[in-house]
Structures are given as C-alpha cells and as structure tokens.
Amino acid sequence: MLKYNYMSYEQNIKFTPEPAEENIFGVQLTPEEMSRELEKYHQWYEKENRKLERMAVPLNEKQQKVVGFIDEEFKKLFKRFNIENFDSGQIKIYPLKFQDFINFMKEDEAGAKFMLGGYDVLRKCVAINQTKDFVSDKSLIVWTENLAHELIHGKSYQVMQISKDNPSSKRSVKSIDIYRFGPQIYELGASTDYFGWLNEALATKLSVEMTEAIVNENKDLYIQSMSPKEKNKDHYQLPEKFVFYKPFRSVLAKMVEGIARKNKLSKEEVFQKLYHSFFTGRLLEVARLIEHTYGVGSFRALGNVKEENHQMALKYLESKDPQSQDKYAHKIMPDETEGRGRSAKQIPSREYQEYKKYQKLMAEIKEIREMK
Ligand SMILES: [Zn+2]
C-alpha cells in the first residue's frame, strides 16, 4: 500500500529502454565479458532499488498531487521541444528519511542538510530528502521545484560506459560508469567531466519554469508557501533565493545571447536546440552552433567551465578578438597547453567516434540476443 504513494509516478511511464542494455557504450570487451558485466550490473541495480523501496516513506496528499502536476508538465514540454515520441523510461521516486538520504547521496550530514533531492544515473531513481522542514506546507514550492529538477535529470539523455578496468570506480560493479548525463560528458578514469555546468543550468531553468506554471495554475494549493508579496501578485515568479546554480545560469544566458545574435535565431530557438540535445543526446548541432559563434575550439573550452572559473567564461564569451579570447580560454583550461585548442576539437570528434562505436555495439547486442 505504501508502494503507490511513491510509485504513482511510474505508472504513467513505461520502462523502456532498460537501463543497461540499450544504453551502454561497449569498449574493449568481448561479448561474453560484456554480458557478464551487464548481468552483474542488473543484479546490483535490482538489489539497490529493492533496498530503497524498503526505506521509502509515503508522500503526503499534496506531494502526490504535485507528482501528477509535474507529469502533466512533462507532456507539454516534450511537445514544445519537438520530442513527442520521446520516452526516457521509468524513473522511481524514493522519499527518504534524512539518514537514508545521506547514505543515498554519499554525503556527510553537513552537506546533505542543504540538499533536497538527488538523481542517480546508475540506479535510475530520484531520492527526496523528506526532512520535516522540506515537507511542510510552507515549503511546497521548494519541494515542487526540487522534484521537477531531479525528474528533468532523470528524463535527460543518459548513457553508461563499460570497460574492463575502471580504477576510479568505488562501486561494486566496477566496470559500469556514467558516460553521458544530459549534455555532461564523463571520461573513464579522468578526474574531470565536461559540461556539468550546462547540465545544471538547463535543468534549473526548466524546473523553475515548470514550477511557476504549476504554482500559477494551482495557487490555492501553494498559498501557504507564498510570501505576502507573492500572494498578491497576479503571476507568481520563483524568488531568486529558491533558484540554485546562479553562476552556471549566468554563463548559459550569455552563451545563448551570443548564439542567438550570431546565428539570427531567437533565444527561444536556441534554447529549443539546447533542450533537444539535453533530452536526445545529440550534441553535434549544439557543438557546431557554439563553434560557429565563438570560433574553432570553443566547444571544448566551454566544456571546462566550473563554478570557480565562471567569471572567466563570461569574459571569454564577451571577448571580441581572438587574442583576449585565447587569454580567457587559458584561464578556463589551466591545464591545457594549447590554449583554447584551436586545432584540437577533441570533444566533438570524440562524440562522433563514440557514436560510431555505439552503433556497432548495438548491432552486436542485437546479434547476441537473436542467437539466444
Ligand atoms: Zn541538478
């Protein structure tokens, strides 16, 4: 009976593709090794999810309503971004008590206190911090934005990669790791990843828009979480203090402005392209747009934006001449010797190579299945 409280979301969504098989890049593995790794992964996935299911606490009535609202918003969203047949598969929602939430996030108590939720690519589920403060009527707007945000991550494009030896993995299934998460790109064994900022900035912009739409349509439900000032407005807007990732959002805004100007597109059109790649994984068009706007190598440079260098990224996007652009590129990529890497378009071409590998792998998997 508890089940339906937190599983209600998934009833509307089919579980395709399966988390592993359809979604894995194969690297240097024989088919036998590959199916062994997949099997291990599946077992781990099932075990983890069963564990979380047992720990999950019920949602209250209002929260259950919110889950339905968000679901409706997703339907509108996919129409708006021209991905009508899109189906990212089922995402489980686990509302957890604080201690369980800390464990899920692999955070310490101090860090987890400020986290409202998290999405895990490998376990393909959202965990919600059901600490009292976050689940009161007074925080329902924040709760909504948080769940919408994590579900947007959950519905974004995701690919896992598999390799024989992954020394950086702390998981029990060592060979499986994230390769793509929305526009974010991970390298096996590398200490850094690319476009994490874009992933968060896009997810946040969308979750804010969704939340505002939901709140405006259901003001009665949310009235208790509104400040007196907001209550009297015709149109509710999420106060800035509820919106995270400000540095990343400012880089995104600047980048979209530049792309729109240079390519004679409206900002909405640029966002449409960015979100299309966010949900479908196709980064090449975005890469081309960025490079056409900011020059060869700029896609690679912008991949390296982090919170600590976002000011440099803003200056990079504002630079008018190649010289100052190079200067700021060096600051965004301090470890790179080639500056903004005019000749080294590693990410776009890597993407393409991986795509080729992926296609080959899919063909192989199909063959293995048919053999069975
Ligand atoms: Zn996020």
Image: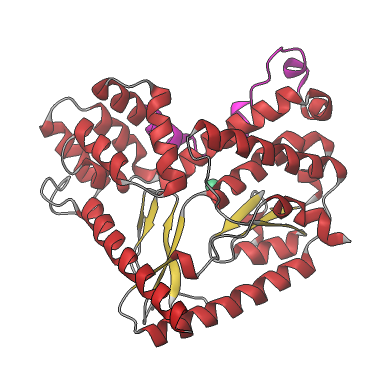
Residue 137 magenta-highlighted: no
Where residue 30 appears, as percent x and y from the top left, is: 34, 84
Q: Residue at x 57, y 52 (%)?
A: 154
Quarter of the rendering containing residue 252: top left
Left or right for 279, reference 167: right
Residue 236 magenta-highlighted: yes
Where residue 179 appears, as percent x and y from the top left, is: 40, 62
The answer, for residue 255, to whether it is visible in the render is yes
Left or right for 366, reference 114: left
Q: Is residue 352 above or below residue 283?
A: below
Q: Nearer the viewer, residue 3 or 322?
A: 3
Specify the quadrant that holds the N terminus. bottom right
Q: Residue at x 72, y 34 (%)?
A: 141
Left or right for 12, reference 81: right
Where residue 91 appears, as percent x and y from the top left, is: 64, 56
Q: Which residues are magenta?
A: 227-253
The answer, for residue 243, to whether it is visible in the render is no
Left or right for 59, reference 353: right
Q: Residue at x 76, y 12 (%)?
A: 232
Q: Nearer the viewer, residue 109 or 207?
A: 207
Q: Residue at x 32, y 23 (%)?
A: 260
Q: Nearer the viewer, residue 198 or 15?
A: 15
